[in-house]
Image (cartoon, rainbow, N blue to C red):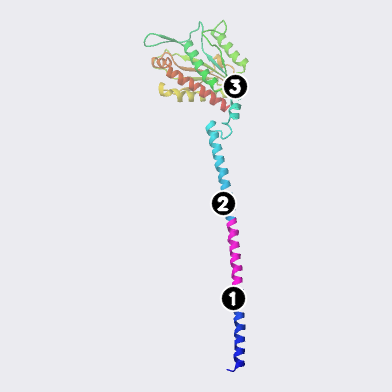
């Protein structure tokens, strides 16, 4: 190879080397751009994932807060009305509503009218007028604790008006009507002089009043729930148009024969505090349940 050829070959080789380096640099630059583009995509995806995670956390916080709020409302309220009913303003509203409802309790008999006389095994006597007054007072205390307004037709061993027993009952019914009682409950002790054994509570109502009939069923259910384990017999709702206290079908009224004072076993129960407390609680629960339904 001549000197000229060697020089030409060297120049050509240098050009090829420069070209290769240039091509390599372009490839490297293209790689960097591609890598940067892929990195950008990954960052974009990461931002979306982060945003989704934030939204998920916010939703979880809202759900948790709602559950806590509901739980507090349930604990403070009745448990069946949801949040808001059990808060202070809800309780106040419910209390005001109850205080506007007047419940009339009528302790049967009184004064010179003792009613049925029950003779206990030890020879001591229990009079119906004393039993009914004690039960009315126990029931009134429980209803007042629930926020209701109460009217007792008598608060002592007295009669309301002179005259016959019918005059007395009519005067008590008129009192409840004039005062606008939402419900009248007349309490009595039953008697039976026939053969066999008669026991258990009876809830009497005027058959001309569908409202009173429904109310009587509620009272019979609550009395049974609270006392059947002691008496061995469920209370029954009975239609009877003959009682003067029930004469007005437009005023919901019940006459409750709490038990038979002529039955030694039932008389023994009625003389004790266990039965009296259970029966008073049944009357209060039934009243509250009925008012909520009506």
| Dominant secondary structure (helix, strand or loop) of the stretch shown in magenta | helix
Q: Identify the image quadrant of residue 208.
A: top right
Which residue does the image show at 50% across and 13% down from the upper left?
133
Pick whichever of labels 1 and 2 is earlier in the sequence: 1
Pick whichever of labels 3 and 1 is earlier in the sequence: 1
Q: Position of residue 224 (x, y in %)?
A: 46, 24
Q: Pointer 2: what residue? A: 53
Q: Pointer 1: what residue? A: 24
User: Which SS class for mark 1?
Assistant: helix
Q: Is residue 138 in sight in this rendering?
A: yes
Asked if the magenta segment contains residue 111, the reply would be no
Question: Could you say which is closer to the camera, residue 127 or residue 190?
Answer: 127
Is the residue 85 above or below the residue 147 in the image? Answer: below
Mark 3 vs mark 2, foreground winner is 2
User: Which SS class for mark 3?
Assistant: helix
Find residue 126 and name its label: none
Magenta highlight range = 28-47
Q: Identify the image quadrant of residue 38.
A: bottom right
Q: Position of residue 68 (x, y in %)?
A: 54, 38
Find residue 99 and name its label: 3
């Amino acid at each position: 190879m001549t000197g000229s050829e060697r020089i030409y070959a060297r120049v050509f080789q240098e050009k090829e080397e420069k070209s290769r380096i240039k091509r390599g640099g372009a490839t490297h630059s293209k790689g960097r751009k591609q890598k940067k583009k892929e990195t950008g995509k990954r960052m974009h995806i990461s931002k979306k994932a982060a945003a989704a995670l934030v939204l998920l956390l916010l939703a979880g916080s809202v759900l948790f807060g709602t559950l806590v709020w509901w739980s507090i409302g349930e604990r403070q309220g009745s448990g069946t009305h949801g949040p808001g009913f059990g808060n202070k303003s809800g309780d106040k509203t419910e209390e005001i509503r109850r205080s506007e409802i007047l419940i009339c309790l009528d302790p049967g008999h009184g004064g010179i009218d003792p009613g049925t006389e029950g003779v206990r095994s030890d020879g001591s006597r229990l009079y119906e007028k004393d039993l009914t007054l004690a039960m009315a007072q126990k029931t009134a205390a429980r209803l007042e604790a629930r926020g209701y307004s109460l009217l007792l037709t008598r608060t002592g061993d007295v009669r309301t008006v002179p005259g016959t027993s019918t005059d007395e009952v009519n005067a008590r019914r008129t009192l409840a009507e004039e005062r606008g009682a939402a419900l009248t409950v007349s309490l009595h002790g039953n008697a039976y002089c026939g053969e066999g054994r008669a026991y258990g509570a009876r809830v009497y109502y005027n058959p001309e009043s569908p409202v009173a009939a429904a109310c009587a069923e509620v009272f019979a259910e609550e009395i049974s729930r609270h006392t059947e384990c002691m008496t061995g017999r469920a209370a029954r709702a009975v239609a009877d148009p003959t009682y003067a206290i029930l004469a007005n079908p437009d005023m919901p009224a019940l006459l409750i024969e709490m038990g038979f004072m002529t039955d030694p076993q039932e008389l023994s129960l009625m003389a004790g505090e266990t039965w009296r407390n259970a029966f008073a609680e049944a009357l209060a629960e039934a009243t509250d349940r009925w008012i909520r339904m009506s």
